[in-house]
Image: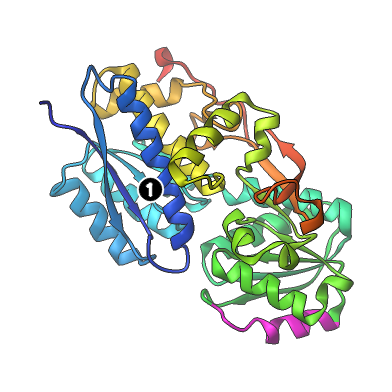
Amino acid sequence: MAEKIKVGFPVPLSGTYGTEAKEQLTAAELAVDEFNASGGLDGREAEIVVRDTKLLKELAQSSAEELCTKEKVHVMVGALKSEDMVEISKICAKHGILYNAISQSDTILEIHNRRRSTFHEGWDFHMGGGAIGRYAFSHYGNRVAVLSGIQELGEHFTRALLHVGTQIGVDFIYNDKHPVGCQDFRPFLKRIQELKPEVLVFNCFGADQLNAVKQSRELGIFEDTRIVLANFSVTQRMIGGADVFEGVVGACGYYWRLEEKFASAKEFNKNYRVRSGGVAPTTYSAFGYVGTKTVLTAIQRAKTLETEKLIREMLAMRFDFCRGPQFYRGLDHQSVQPVVIVESKSESDMQSPDDFFEILEVNEFLGPRTFLVSRETV
């Protein structure tokens, strides 16, 4: 039997982002199953080789090195932290391995961090922050408070919001940072409440997001202020419940009701639910699925594991695997994709147990569209 195609998959299964990382893995496993069921690479099947990075940069580095040198993976997909993706990208490039990063980042797109063998499936912060900023500031008011986690996610989402807000005359009356893993947001929230913003944007993720929203609800901030999440985690909405999140608006990369717009989403939802025991896919499910499926599709189309040929196939692909048309920009290998603006429903408005959101807007093809390429030009 031929050796299996090894897909390295370093993600933080332990820690603050652990639930979302498990969703990435579940979806990646689905993509591998589909690849194998379709015949693989001339009958050669794939398998995922997982490492838990525990949200630690040093462990992400050592895991990537081990996957490349000891496990001898053929391609790499994964990470759920901007800094980790950059480090994994460097290691994969050193070993000549194709890497598809599946979390959000601006840094991985910066000129000094670009690698020919690296692609970025998650949307960048400027893409997501710009989308939610334009929507929230034009609908809910221009007196805005921003509270961000002390990490790249918080810093870069804030940068995007400030860029958009400055263009349309937003008054940013508060802008501060909190530690990752913050248990008590009240000192920040009480100061914000005194300033009476029309919009309060949280640029945080994982359990931080739930705690920030829950404590805002407890303090009564919702009475006068619209709460907005730059990166709305469906997972935290599932954990926190309708009463905590009712009326919260945010941006996400995927919501299962996209099946009403895209046939690919309906198929993905069906297959994912089978694997997950009936749980609907989330943004991170979509990142894990598309990030893995594009790499495996490139392998099938190129009929080889040679990295340079896989790069050409990735750049030539025009695909719709679960959320509408996508492609990778030739300039920086960023995935051009929809960003979804949603509002969390009240329990009485939910039509099913996982009918969490109303889709307010779907922003398709955000970012430059002038870098289309073909196999003949790359």
Residue that badge 1 annotates: 78
- Kindly identify the residue that appears in the image at 71 percent across and 37 percent down: 363
Q: Is residue 187 magenta?
A: yes
Q: Nearer the viewer, residue 285 or 74?
A: 285
- Amino acid at dot 1: Gly
Residue 173 locus on image (x, y percent): 81, 73
Residue 135 locus on image (x, y percent): 80, 49
Q: Residues within 10 Å of mark 1 (few under 14, many from 20)?
A: many
- From the image, which quarter does the N terminus lie in? top left
Q: Main secondary structure of the magenta part?
A: helix
- Kindly identify the residue that appears in the image at 66 percent across and 35 percent down: 258
- From the image, which quarter does the C terminus lie in? top left
Residue 96 locus on image (x, y percent): 23, 38
Q: Nearer the viewer, residue 182 or 107?
A: 182
Q: Is residue 361 magenta?
A: no
In the picture as drawn, the residue positioned furthest to the top comes out as 376
The magenta-colored residue range is 182-194
- Kindly identify the residue that appears in the image at 57 percent across and 57 percent down: 235
Residue 313's image quarter? top left
Whether residue 114 is visible here, answered yes or no, is: no
Q: How is the image coloured?
A: rainbow
